[in-house]
Amino acid sequence: MRLLVEVKALCDAVYDLKYHHKLQGFLYRLLKDTAYSNLHDRRGYKFFSFSNIFPPEDMREGDVRRFLIASPDPALIETFREQLAHVDRVNVGDMSFSLQRVSVLRPRIGRSCTLVAATPIIVRIPKANYRKYGIEPPKDYPYVYWRKRYPFEAFIKQLEDNLIKKFKAFHGEAIEPTPIFEEFVFRKQVCNHIIVKGREVKVFGSLWTFIFKNLYKDKRRIIQFGLETGFGELNSLGFGFINPITEKKDAPRN
């Protein structure tokens, strides 16, 4: 379940590429004095994700922009919707908007589907797995971010493990590790700058397209869950946001 939030620029502004913690802060403030008011401080997974503000371009006063909020928890999405009903203005750093409308979306995946990473997927490989994947970092790091110079196997395995752990934590169900990703297309590697405890740090991510065919019930549930909670790590900072690609039907012939 997700929300499509439409906003209108109140003034000319340069698009802020370091929007992550600022938009996250806006969302957490919406949860103040609700049943989710302690979500920010809660240990473990947050079970929500959000897109970038799109299109990601400098804006003029009056330009329309949008962003999406997604979660496998319908009550959390409903809380966001209720709180947004009382919002007139959305401030994300130096970007200021008036709130125009909020729409509820319920995308469902079928037996076959194509998913695209709308924001970079972050995957960290722990030191314990360096030898397994033949990784030799220049320093004794506790983990490394997956980058294209590392084996694709490392990315997919860590991605699957992360998704299964989140699924178990949310549903409280025991589920056996299983290969999830069938076909995948690497699009590009990216480096983002985020603010952590007042300090700017780099995170390395990657953009992918995932193709699924003949999904059976349990596997479809896992993929549907990933569509809403996000793929990889740092989902509540806006990373790993996933969109379904809707196939265009051929135009009718005369």
Image: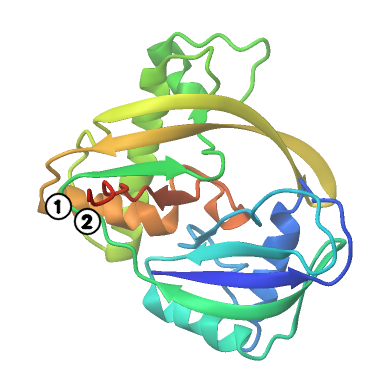
Is 42 above or below relative to 185?
below
Does residue 12 show up?
Answer: yes
**Would you name the residue on which mark 2 appears?**
221
Q: Secondary structure at mark 1?
A: helix
The residue lying at 77 percent from left, 37 percent from top is: 201
* Residue at 45 percent of width and 33 percent of height: 208
Q: Nearer the viewer, residue 13 or 160?
A: 13
Position of the N terminus by quadrant: bottom left
Residue of label 1: 218
Residue type of the residue flagged with mark 2? Arg
The front one of 118 and 33 is 118
Residue situated in front as seen by the camera: 91 or 42 = 91
Query: What amino acid does circle 1 point to?
Result: Asp
Q: Residue at x 54, y 37 (%)?
A: 122
- SS type, badge 2: helix
Q: CA distance from mark 1 to mark 2?
A: 5 Å
* 200 sits left or right of 119 in the view: right
